[in-house]
Amino acid sequence: MAQYDVIIIGGGPGGYNAAIRAGQLGLKVACVEKRGTLGGTCLNVGCIPSKALLHASEMYEIARKDFAGIGIDVDAKLNLPQMLKQKEDSVGALTKGIEFLFKKNKADWIKGAGRIAGPGKVAVVAEDGSEQILEAKNIVIATGSEPTPLPGVTIDQKQIVDSTGALALSAVPKRLAVIGAGIIGLELGSVWRRLGAEVTVIEFLDRTIPGADAEVATAFQRSLTKQGVVFQLGTKVTGAKTAKSGVTLTVEAVAGGGAQTVEADVVLVAIGRRPYTEGLGLETVGIVPDKRGFIDTDHWATSAPGVWAIGDVTHGPMLAHKAEDEAVACIERLAGKAGHVNYDVIPGVIYTWPEVAWVGKTEEELKTAGVAYKVGKFPFSANSRAKVNHEAEGFVKVLADATTDRILGVHMIGPQVGEMIGEYCVAMEFSAASEDVARTCHPHPTRSEALRQAAMGVEGWTMQA
Ligand code: FAD
Ligand code: NAI
């Protein structure tokens, strides 16, 4: 029976980073993954393929709509098979990269479905049905999440798809209905709108991107509406009927009123994700997930000695970088080191046009907590680089403690803000005051100057607006 210091179940950003860190620390480690490739949801059907399509579709739209204005005449035509192929090529190269990193760090990839088979034991069933039992001093659960189903709207991955299906549509639907105005709905809705679909987003709540700062969410919805996305907020879907000609959704206003219908060629269900622990044998070590299926942990240790949990399967934002940070901290802890994750500084990014990025507390959260704060704001319309690039939409908002000036939250909407939020993550990790950023020299002309100007705005000495 093979024996390990640590066996990780699941090879996504949580699992593969845990395996690599364990290898680096000299632990004997195996990672059990049932998918044919490493990288989990993120690399195979999540972050990476969605960003590949967001980038390509953005280029297509820019070529069609913006090139002429800057003096480039082209006749841009969509080649969807090639667009999908370059996405798959990137996914293939990156998942292979993880295999390479496993070899480099002496982490074994055990192919098959893993199941906890009592304390210190993991059973692995390979594709051919054969089973082996492995022994480990520690087991890390990193089995991730899956799309939350919507009763009455059954996924067939052709006419009614989840995010995985929406990453691989073989033709641009004429009408795409998206259920859920969250991150997946608006990212993938953007992809297909740019490629030619008429997109209608149906959302239960009376706002988009719940959890994000409300002022940013309002500006974001306005921008997407201008781009042609139709929003039906405060609306619930009560059923779906498929026919050759398309899908008929029945919808109802949450506030009451009669049933209506929405016709679509393809429906994307994107109402959230839920933790995935099916067939994991949690009962063999006495772990009981909470009501929503999440595994409770204390610094990544579960209630069962020697069993740990990280990533989407535990509480907190369902984000790849959160899973990665937990992976490193968990392995460091089980190796006797001081693993740490700062949950106050986990950024969020929506990779649409414009992008949305944030870190720390929203204005709503600060109000609810009764924290006195000051606001500094700066629009990209007053930033020279954004202006000359004709990308002047959006703003940066910095929230700082009214007494200490410590930065509490930063919320941005605008061109490539996802690439810039890291500056504020570093600042917040160092407990910076807004004045620290305001007095830091930034290169000119760059969009990053808007980040500085917003910090200057906290004390009211913004220069350019
Ligand atoms: P996962 O990545 O889900 O990996 C879990 C792995 O465990 C899977 O490969 C699964 O096959 C395997 N597994 C499960 N059970 C078993 C078992 N019993 N035996 C063996 N293997 C098992 N996050 C971001 O930060 N940025 C983004 O831009 C982003 N974009 C996204 C876009 C989409 C369309 C989706 C769906 C998600 C996106 N996410 C993004 C979220 C991100 O993918 C997840 O937060 C992240 O993958 C979670 O990592 P994880 O390791 O916890 O789980
Ligand atoms: P989400 O939680 O972001 O949004 C789901 C939306 O659906 C919410 O607005 C919710 O109110 C709505 N909703 C729920 N039930 C509904 C119903 N019955 N009818 C209509 N609307 C309903 O979830 P989403 O978009 O599915 O994404 C899941 C997770 O994946 C995200 O929360 C995020 O953690 C991760 N992700 C991250 C990305 C990024 O970092 N760029 C990209 C894509 C996904």
Image: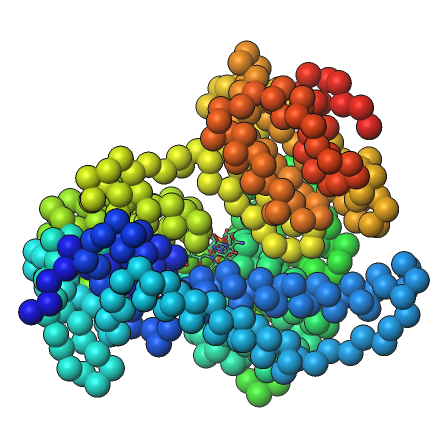
In the displayed orientation, state which residue is furthest to the top. Answer: 403
Residue 24 vertical placement versus 90 (above, below): above
Q: Is residue 28 left or right of residue 366?
A: left
Residue 267 vertical placement versus 275 (above, below): below
Q: Looking at the picture, how far across and down is residue 84, in whole percent?
A: 59, 77
In the depicted view, which residue is nearer to us: 91 or 68? 91
When asked about the image quadrant of residue 196, the answer is: bottom right
Q: Is residue 111 left or right of residue 352?
A: left
In the depicted view, which residue is nearer to us: 426 or 263? 426
In the displayed orientation, state which residue is furthest to the bottom. Answer: 244
The count of marks equals 0
Residue under the point 76% across and 23% down? 462
**Quarter in which the C terminus is drawn:** top right
* Residue 128 can be seen in this image: yes
When asked about the image quadrant of residue 74, the answer is: bottom right
Q: Is residue 267 left or right of residue 387?
A: left
Residue under the point 70% across and 32% down? 442
Q: Looking at the picture, how far across and down is residue 277, in whole percent?
A: 26, 61
In the depicted view, which residue is nearer to us: 440 or 349? 440
**Quarter in which the N terminus is drawn:** bottom left
**Quarter of image, ligand 1:** bottom left
* Residue 278 can be seen in this image: no
When asked about the image quadrant of residue 139, the answer is: bottom left
